[in-house]
Amino acid sequence: MASLQFNELAYTNLDEFIYGHAKKPVVCSNGMVIGGGTVYPEVNLTLPTMLINTETMPKVLSQYEEMIHGICSKAHELLSPGIIIEIELLPPCTFNPQWGIDVTKVVKGVMNEYYSKFGLKSLLRMTVVDIREGKTLTHMYKGEHWDNVIKTFRGCAEAGADFLAIESIGGKHLHDEAVMNCDLPRALFSLGVVGCRDMVALWDEIVKISTETNCIPSGDTACGFANTSMVMAHKNFIPKVFAAIDRVMCAVRTLVAVERGALGPDKDCGYEGVYLKAITGIPISMEGRTAACAHSSSVGNIAACLADCWSNESVENVRLLGGMAPTVYTEHLIYDCRIMNVASARGFALEMRDILSESDRMYDPQAYILDPGVVIKISQEIVKGKTHFERTKIAASATIKELRSAFQDGLLQLDTKELKYLDIFEKQLKLIPNDEAEFTQFMIKNSTLDKFDPAKYDFNFDVVAK
Amino acid sequence: MFDFTGLSNAVIEGDNDQVQAKVKEAISANVDPLAIINQGLIGGMNVVGQRFKVNDMFVPEVLMSARSMNAGIELVKPLLAGGEMTNRGTVIIGTVKGDLHDIGKSLVGMMLECSGFKVIDLGVDVSPEEFIAAIKENDGKILALSALLTTTMLSMKSTIEECVEQGMRNDIKVIIGGAPISQEFSDQIGADGYAGDAAAAVELVAKLLQ
């Protein structure tokens, strides 16, 4: 493992830690600067109910074409200073890389058309689905699944993607088990040991492809991890404090993409992106109330505090009274961005940020840990860790401490059940040894091969032990 | 008359040691093994199911209760002839072809197991042919299909059509669920029922097997 970077925070002054501005803005070839002072809308869309196969691919492509026309047309009509479009490829379009490439070509073609006709600036983020799971997976880094992921990345980059991204899943099955059982040590093993190692292998390859294709490696997200916890907590299946702790732990895993060369903007559904921004200074995409079309959350406003791009997570191409849903959501996003950008221009960005935070943070621990001040405080603790394992463990303990203190100070509402679980998680953490090798050995002994097969990950215990 | 309250409460608390102690006590008192299971262990688990349904228990607590119930059943099993008493019916469950989403389906499977059904979990990206083979192999009574993507929902329809083609549609009840699924869609594709969450899925399965 390469040594960790980012041992200090990019932000020490809370007043500089704000939406639209990043310490390391991403300058794009069309002149758009992400994190350079303007918050841009990032529209994410998906297909309506339909199968994807050889016969339906022409219809699939025409659906994408129709959606992008609607989005670009609305962005032009509302004089958006620019727009980002994210396509999260569906599994068949990664299992068959050429289909993903064809989607990229069609989408980029429409975007180019609106640039040449109307001067609409736009950027395309292609998010390749991580298909490295299922019964036929033989290995995480070789074989058909890996090859198709890599081919899709390269093909999408060559077909015109501006940003490459992924919602990677290394260690996810361990994490699913951890969520169901509220097992913090297992979550730590999944994220801080297995997940971080997987991120290194995967992101080294994505960064290499990006360099060779003049594309920007943007970032990852803990969608399969902390977002699973978020949804489970929302349904009252698990305590909200678990989801909050899990979110911060996930930051260490998602951060690995940046350690390996990702430049941002980090992906929208990675709410842990705020920690990445604090630690590395890269710009981030976030989603809040505008993502209610895809999933509910308790962070509708607070998620915007530090956003450099403002997203809607995903909306399917169905007709609403106001038009097709992706077009309608484009309008939502553009108006949200306008108000944030005008507040900045009038010198009220800090007030706007704090209003966004205060309107949410008290009601849910998952919101509280997105408050900019809290993010800086916990991030300062995280970077003290010397390894990913240590950092993930610190992330958990610092979050527990912060949530308890916020409750005691009357800054956060937690019921007795949630408080009971804070005690439980504190006890679970205390049982985790400081020695990563000892911990790893214990976890492997207590995991089944269907949840984690070390051989598929080239997981060499001797290397961990050293 | 043996008082099963203590045993049921131990199951509700997920207290393995206490469950085992209470079961041993019942066995020593020559209580009918089936009564220990149905009134004591499953009785406790029924309360757990009700509490979970009204958000009074979290999933990990339900799992702890289920584990303690199973620990109790293991002690009683040798006293029973056959061993078929705990299976309320076999459910074949999986996420349909093309879809890799796992946890919602696993949660439904777990809740069904906790409620006394035998669950055969085929995992994700399961083809109609694999579902059919599992139904035949395990004498499945319920086929539970999950999908999270708008582009995989129609694989549910293909799976039902495969059941019809194989001449087994009348022998199995098909239930469906997942974020984009609705009762309307269930009706459209000819499923026997739709459940919006894990607790509703358990009720639906129980109702369909009555």
Image (spheres, coloured by chain):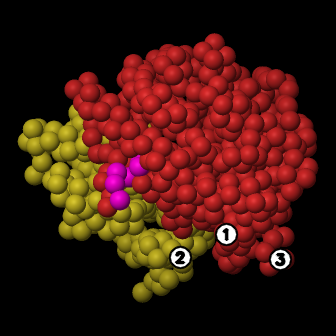
Chain colours: A red, B yellow
* Label 3 or label 1, whichever comes before in sequence order: 1
Q: Quadrant of the C terminus of chain A?
A: top right
**A2 or A214, which lies in front?**
A214
Mark 1 residue type? Asp
The residue that appears at 35% across and 47% down in the rendered structure is A317
| Residue nearest the observer in this picture, A258 or B73 | A258
Identify the mark at residue A16; answer none if there is no mark: none
Q: Residue at x 39, y 63 (%)?
A: B197
Q: CA distance from mark 3 to mark 2?
A: 24 Å
Secondary structure at numbered mark 1: loop
Q: On the rendered structure, is A350 left or right of A115?
A: right
Q: Point out the stretch of residues depicted in magenta.
A: A322-327
Relative to B201, is A148 above or below? above
Left or right: residue A213 versus residue A249 is: left
- Is-magenta flag for residue A215? no
How far across and down, in percent of the image, does residue A157 sit? 54, 20
Could one spot residue A139 in this view of the protein?
Answer: no
Label 2 resides on the chain identified as: B
The residue marked by circle 1 belongs to what chain?
Answer: A
Dot 1: within a 10 Å radius of its alpha carbon, few (fewer than 14), some, or many (20 or more) residues? many
Point out the image quarter for the N terminus of chain A: top right
Choose top left, top right, bottom left or bottom right for residue A202. top right
Residue topped by disc 3: A408
Q: Position of residue B105 (x, y in %)?
A: 41, 50
Q: Are marks 3 and 2 on the same chain?
A: no
Mark 2, Cα crowd under 10 Å, few <14 / some 14-19 / many 20+, is few
Q: Which residue is mark 1?
A: A360
Q: Is residue A234 above or below residue B191?
A: below
Q: Amino acid at mark 3?
A: Gln
Residues tagged by mark 3 and mark 1 found on one chain of the structure: yes
Mark 2 — residue?
A: B56
Q: Secondary structure at mark 3?
A: helix
